[in-house]
Image: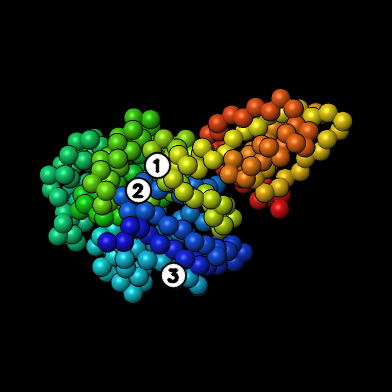
Amino acid sequence: MNDNAIEIRGLVKTYFPFRLGALDLTVPRGAIYGLIGPNGAGKTTILDLIYGMGRNEEGEIRVLGFDHQRDAVALKRRTSYVSPELNFDVWGSVGRAIRFVRGFYPTWDDAYCKDLMKSFDLDAGARIAWLSFGARTKLSVLLALAHRPELLLLDEPTTGLDAVSKQQLFAELLRIVEDGERTVLISSHNLTDIERFADHVGMIRHGQLLLEGRMDEVVDRFRLAEFFTENNAEFANRDGFIVVKRNENRWQAVLDQERGVADWLQKSGAQNLSLTRMTLEDLFVALAREKEAV
């Protein structure tokens, strides 16, 4: 069995003037993978293409071992996609929406569906048009989860959810990946949520993947450096070193610890060097700023 749920190689898609790629991305099987980036970075485009909505101009996408276009029917039986664009008003009530979607999936789990309804505080008789935005999101997640998909694609699923609902959602996501066979790819610009719950991360900006890997390894790899200089010493961005802030002779910068930059700094005149662990948000902002300056 392939160890990866999703493998993307050389992906290119253009919606002029936006261009995605060329992009390589790997989502391990059994992971909760957070795809992060600002609005307009290309996150939704990636999820759409993975699910077979639209055609890529170049490259290959394999999902659960399937070609995302040639094997579209088999792929959709094993995956689910939750998007803010989904609208269920035409079904009238929560119960009717569930009965309609249930008919498409032989693997639908009625008991699990009832558990989700209770957990998400959804009533079968409730009219969908009267549901809050957060409740609509919960309904989308329920319809996606109840047939026990091998891969769940979530596009900004926490939009409109309060703190309690977010906890319920992520607790359910953690449960579904416990067996190591089910995978979640979640796109979001809420970096705090992703850092807490995802075990893998990919950072994207302007259609380009800045970095990806295990969450702990990515965050531990970088440090915020603070130091002082004398004699008008100057430092500029270089591989593994990104200047964040300077106030006369006091500096802040992001260091890639795999590049041996700390030794280079001290040899180049940095004094009183201190290194502090960064949050995922701090790291993303620094990496994105570096790309903007290139």
Q: CA distance from mark 1 to mark 2?
A: 8 Å
Q: Position of residue 135 (x, y in %)?
A: 31, 40
Q: Picture quarter containing residue 199?
A: top left
| Disc with the residue nearer the chain's start (1 vs 3) | 3
Q: Is residue 68 above or below residue 112?
A: below
Identity of the amino acid at label 3?
Glu
Q: Residue at x 13, y 48 (%)?
A: 110
Measure the C-alpha gap from mark 1 to mark 3.
25 Å
Mark 1 neighbour class, 10 Å CA radius: few under 14, some 14 to 19, many 20 or more: many
Q: Secondary structure at mark 2?
A: loop
Please give the label number shown on residue 60: 3
**Element at label 3:** strand
Q: How many marks?
A: 3
**Location of residue 53 in the rendering, given as x and y in whole percent from the top left corner:** 39, 66
Colour style of the rendered protein structure: rainbow
> CB under 8 Å between callouts 3 and 2?
no
Q: Which label was assigned to residue 31?
A: 2
* Residue 139 appearing in the image: no
Q: Residue at x 39, y 54 (%)?
A: 27
